[in-house]
Amino acid sequence: MIRINLVGEAGAGRPEPPGRTVRADRGRAIGRLLALGMMLGAATVVLNWRVEQAARGRSLEARIQQLRRQRQQHQELARELQGLESGGLAMERRIQGIERLRALQARPVRVLDLLSDCVQEVPGLRLRELSRRDGAFSLRGLVSGDSSRVSEFIARLQRTGEFSRVELVHFQEQSGHYAFALSFQEAGPEESANSPDAAAGEAGD
């Protein structure tokens, strides 16, 4: 018996079975989903990287601003310390000056009193100038009448016991007057104790 297979020819124009079409569509959809997923994953990675870089940039900028503020604070502190140091030096010098003045406060007053007494005890003697430097005095004056009054004035200064190294620096006659200049120093405690006036006072006691 001869069988003739006409199925192939007869079925050539028929559509594919539904199951095969569904599987093809499903494969294409899965491929598209995979491609979309890869794109989304790549975009997520790029986005995360950009967010991380932006956060790192903000952190670096904040750190830079903090360092700038610290540097400014250090500069201000340095200027303040420099000002305090200068002020401290000026204050120290001022304190030293006050201490020196305090140490000399009593003696110059006594020196002026003694000079005034000696001038009043010598007739015709006038002081024109008195200066003091580093414990040494310079004195200029005029004497009318006898020139020996200058020697008398020097002797009276020496007898006070408060002056040492009394020396005549200048002496000149000027129209009936005698201009003179003296230099002397303050005597130390031992010299004052050994002065003729002090010895006379002890003898009288």
Image: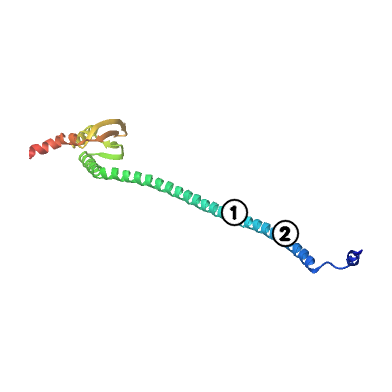
- Residue assigned mark 1: 57
Quarter of image, res 104: top left
**Disc 2 to disc 1: CB gap under 8 Å:** no
Q: Tell me the distance, in whole angstroms, between the alpha carbons under discs 2 and 1.
A: 33 Å
The picture places residue 87, in percent across and down from the top left corner, at 39, 47
Q: Nearer the viewer, residue 157 or 132?
A: 132
The picture places residue 78, in percent across and down from the top left corner, at 45, 47
Quarter of image, res 178: top left
* Total numbered labels placed on residues in the image: 2
* 16 sits left or right of 26 in the view: right
* 157 sits left or right of 47 in the view: left
Inspect the image, locate mark 1, and give the three-letter code of the amino acid beneath it.
Gly
Instruction: Point out the residue furthest to the front here.
Output: 1
Q: Earlier in the sequence, mark 2 or mark 1?
A: 2
* 3 sits left or right of 118 in the view: right
- Residue assigned mark 2: 35
Inspect the image, locate mark 2, and give the three-letter code of the amino acid beneath it.
Ala
Q: Nearer the viewer, residue 84 or 174?
A: 84
